[in-house]
Amino acid sequence: MTHPVDDQRPSQDALLSIVVPVYQSEPCLEPLLERIHQAMASRGITCEVILVNDGSRDGSWRVIETLCARHSHVIGVNHRRNFGQENATMTGMRLARGGLVATMDDDLQNDPFDLLLMIDALHANHSDVVYGFMVPEHEPFWKRFGREVNNKTLEWLLNKPKNVRFTSFRLMTRETCQAILFYEGAFPFVDTLISQVTTKYMHIRVGHRERHAGVSNFTLFKSIQTWMRVVVSFSVTPLRFVTFTGIAIALLGMLAALLVVMQKLFMPEEFSPYDAGWASLMVVMLIMNGMQMCFIGILGEYVGRSYVLLSRRPQSIIAKVLNAPHPALSERMPHESR
């Protein structure tokens, strides 16, 4: 297998770091690396590939060990357990040394050749971040719906421009990457962190490839978890929404009570002793109790995440690093966290 990477370490500015979170993708990794080599060789770009195994239960780590043994520019990282895609991405970004840092999925749905278009777009538009946005032709309804809900949520909470689509296929400058890494909380969300450190981001339309092998690991439950992470980890807007909704309901309640008192005083004949109104009362109680439970749940999310942050829960725990770019990483104890 040929590749554009020399054994001698290139300068930082001339190096492209490609971070790939890996989960249950044993048959995809070797074809992915070959495709990356082909794409980078077509432009003579020097790269390093950082494969972060996030607690896979298949043979993904064995494949990563083999690839690292063959190629000095492939860096393998093994998490002690599954921490999630965003956490694995942050781990890889901390090891990246390149002047440009890319993140992409491990299933070959992101085409490495599209990275070349993203590099051109970043330089041509003087952007800090370029996203590769793809529209899958055959995708479950819940995924399309979830993507739109997540997009609208980011517009509401973070004032994200409507003409920019966030995806996990992204290219950023080293300065942007370093600014993101100041965040050490247990629940990172890379796109949110990007929006906090720069406004110079854009997206370009890229092609969508079929998954090389296996099935997607991104379930409906994980999609909801990701949405909740966006909602309660980086903005107090939901708390303000709860406050204003409570005030509005209280005002409506006081207005309704005033109307009832006025009606009782000035139109007593309208109040029949036989009109109990149990059905309407139960409907109102169910609606109010449901809203209260929802609001308490939102408050509980904030309290729980604040507790986790104060308890200094790590983003990830590294068990092993292969071809470590920094000598000190080779001496890390397996239980030490980043």
Image: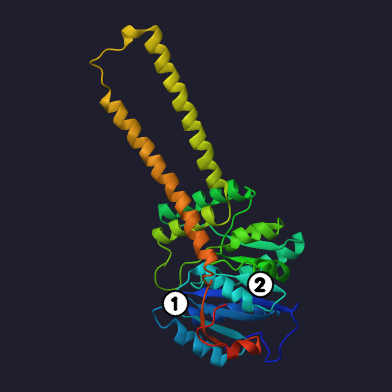
Q: Nearer the viewer, residue 1 or 28?
A: 28
Q: Secondary structure at mark 2?
A: strand
Type of amino acid under label 2: Val
Quadrant including the C terminus: bottom right
Q: Is residue 159 visible?
A: yes
The residue indicated by pointer 1 is: 81
User: Which residue lies most toward the left here?
Assistant: 274
Residue at 68% across / 76% down in the picture? Answer: 16
Q: Secondary structure at mark 1?
A: loop
- How many labels, in total? 2
Type of amino acid under label 1: Arg
Residue 142 at x, y = what percent?
A: 41, 53
Please state if 330 lies on the left or on the right of 257 as rendered. right
Q: Quadrant of residue 275?
A: top left
Residue at 59% across / 85% down in the picture? Answer: 74
The residue indicated by pointer 2 is: 101
Q: Nearer the viewer, residue 144 or 316?
A: 316
Crowding at mark 1 (Cα within 10 Å: few <14, some 14-19, many 20+): some
Q: Is residue 109 visible?
A: no
Residue at 44% across / 80% down in the picture? Answer: 26
**Position of 52 relative to 245 (above/below):** below
**What's the distance in space between the residues labelled 2 and 1, CA to CA?**
25 Å
Q: Nearer the viewer, residue 46 or 19?
A: 19
